[in-house]
Image (cartoon, rainbow, N blue to C red):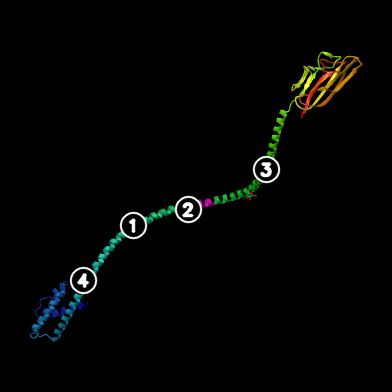
Amino acid sequence: MRSAAVFLALLLCLQWTWAQGESGEVTGTDAETEGGNRQEEVQFEIQGVGAAHDQSSSQTNISPDIWAELKELRDMAIEQKVELRNSKSKIEKLEQENAATQARLTASESKNAVLEAKMSFYEGVVKELQRENMVLETRMSSSENEVAELKRENAATQARLTASESKNAVLESRVNTSENLVAELRRENMVLETRMSSSENEVAELKRENADRPKVAFSAGLTDAGPVGPFNTEITLKFSKVFTNIGQAYSPTTGIFTAPVRGVYYFRFTVWGGRPSAWMGAYLYHNEKRMTLSYDYNDEQAYVSASNALILQLEKGDVVYMTLYPGSGVFDDSFNRTIFSGFLLFAL
Ligand SMILES: *[C@@H]1O[C@H](CO)[C@@H](O)[C@H](O)[C@H]1NC(C)=O
Ligand SMILES: *[C@@H]1O[C@H](CO)[C@@H](O)[C@H](O)[C@H]1NC(C)=O
């Protein structure tokens, strides 16, 4: 604005100068159209004016006010020049700054490009993560349902467990009772086993004893031939019809029983007589010793009999037998009337 005002004033001054017919190298139109070189020309013109003034100040008739004004204008122009120089250096400085800013801008832009690429990459990552997040949320939800289901199942299982535990307690108590019973029974069983074992031993012992114990028993009929006797001498009766002869201690050929072991023996006999008006009788001997004489007299037309029994303690090898009482007879036939028997009661 200020330079424009100065220029306007200068222009007026020049117009005025030209109108006075003085030397004018620069026209008004030139000054108006040559905007780019305006300041240089103005400077030149001012110098020109100054020179003209110096040369013709004494010759021309120009009022001193105008010269003073021109001088003032020239000073102003110089001042403007200085200011212009300052502006130029300012502009240079600004241009440098601008260049620096441009450089920074370029750097910033390339950095921006990098950041945009990164941004784009991270946006992709973010989208991917969002997708994964959705998937995870779905799975999470399904897992939560499963957890809820499992909690329900757990509660049911807990209830069953509690019931089972109380049942267990009852069963445990019963088991304890049973175990005690089993222990008691085992103890009793052991006692019984001991007794059983001892009994078995006793039984075995008894079996052995029984096996070792001599078995002696005989029974024999006299004859099928009818009457035996009477004889004047005493004869041994030979009971020849053997019914039983365990241990073979009785001999039917001699009529003598021989004790195989020391012991207590039982003997018995029956003798019959069939002859009328006659004596019937017999002795039983232990070794040479008569033990009994059993007899009867048949005074009828019939049979008579005599019987007796004895328990004798015999040493091993002792003999027992029967003899016919002299002068008397006995009788036997297929009816088996006259029989001699004996057996070992127990050994000693
Ligand atoms: C069963 O016996 C065991 C061992 O003697 C004992 O610890 C437990 O308390 C008993 N249980 C019951 C229910 O009596
Ligand atoms: C006499 O003993 C024999 C031989 O044991 C027997 O066969 C018979 O039947 C007996 N006689 C009578 C009448 O019992």
Spatial separation of the CA atoms under disc 4 and disc 2: 69 Å
Which residue is labeled 3 in the image?
A: 187
Q: Label 2: how many residues lie within 10 Å, few (<14), some (14-19) or many (20+)?
A: few
Mark 3: few, some, or many residues within 10 Å (few <14, many ≥20)? few
Regarding mark 3 in the picture, which secondary structure is present there? helix
Label 1: element kind: helix
Nearest to the eye among marks 3 and 1: give it: 3
N-terminal label among 4 and 2: 4
* Amino acid type of the residue tagged 2 in the rendering: Ser
CA distance separating discs 3 and 1: 90 Å
Mark 4 highlights which residue? 92
- What's the CA distance linking mark 4 and mark 1? 40 Å
| Residue type (three-letter) at the residue carrying disc 1 | Ser
Instruction: Return the x and y of residue 99 as percentages of the image width and height.
Output: 23, 67
Q: Which residues are magenta?
A: 146-151
56, above or below 36, in the image: below
* Residue 128 seen in render: yes
Q: Earlier in the sequence, mark 3 or mark 1?
A: 1
Q: Which mark is residue 141?
A: 2
